[in-house]
Amino acid sequence: MNTNNNQLVVQCLDLSKTYTQGSIKVHALDHVNFEARQGDFICLSGPSGSGKSTLLNMIGGLDTPSDGEVFIDNEEIDELNKSELADMRLKKIGFVFQAYNLIPVLTAQENIEMVMQMQGISKKERNLKSSAILQEVGLEGMEKRKPPELSGGQQQRVAVARAIVSNPSLVLADEPTANLDSVTANKLIDLMLTMNEVHNTTFIISTHDPMIMQRAKTLVKLHDGKIIETTKP
């Protein structure tokens, strides 16, 4: 495990995103400066329309800024072409979505191994890593189950396992507990915090969930596209 917590993983400089709706300009992000270092567990909070999901999408290279710059591991992602950006996301970023985004015809193990397969990791190593991570997320014995045969909480655990199995620098999670009951949501937060501690993985989570906000190491509040407060609960 790399214990260098000072390494800058994400840096956003003067980031803006403007959408035009008819004759009205909507500032989804308004000159935002933000950074995350290795081992951070950051929660982005704020009302709907505050800009938290937009910021997460900019960091993940899923959307492009109107102005400003995003750096991942000191590399400016706006300078990358489509192929380079896809490669950077594949190797450095794990994504956890509200809707899980699992492939229904694949087993839990196959879903987890998908990213590693795209990275060209051997079948033997994929099997070893996926078996170990399934045990770590409490899904041992469920390797061959497909998403429809798993509960919402179990599916989200598979999604978290898929996001971190290849040791990315960064995991981005957008409303990961939105479809879960409070007991399952708490277990998922426990799991993400454990992964953060054990693997020193940087997590940035966009959420409305007070449980995640209370347990975040850093809480960043957004309103009308601006960061209005950063605290360490």
Image: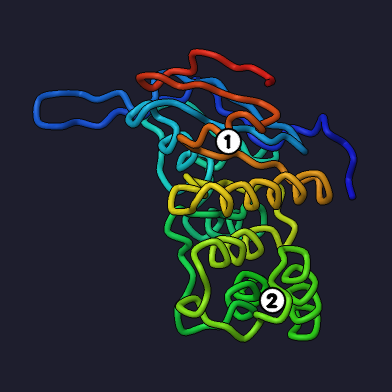
Say if mark 1 contacts mark 2, CB within 8 Å. Answer: no
| Front residue (pair 102, 23) | 102
User: Is 19 on the left or on the right of 145, as rendered?
Assistant: left
Name which residue type carries label 2.
Answer: Gly
Of residue 121 and residue 183, the one placed in the foreground of this image is: 183
Say which quarter of the image contains residue 77. top right
Instruction: Look at the numbered disc 1 and give the secondary structure of its residue.
Output: helix
Q: Is residue 63 left or right of residue 75?
A: left
Query: Which residue extends farthest top?
Result: 228
**The quarter of the displayed image where residue 75 is located:** top right
Q: Residue at x 58, y 66 (%)?
A: 154
Taking the image as shown, residue 88 lies to the left or right of residue 133, namely left
Q: Residue furthest left?
A: 22
Image point 37% across, 27% down: which residue?
47
- Pair 1/2: label in front: 1
What residue is disc 2 on?
120
Give the class, few, some or many, for how many residues have Cα within 10 Å of label 2's Cα (few <14, many ≥20): few
Image disc number at residue 211: 1
User: Residue 176: percent from the left, percent from the top?
Assistant: 51, 49
Give how far apart the Cα atoms at labels 1 and 2 are.
37 Å
Q: How many marks?
A: 2
At label 1, the amino acid type is: Met
Instruction: Kindly identify the residue that appears in the image at 41 percent across and 36 percent down.
Output: 54
Q: Quadrant of the C terminus?
A: top right
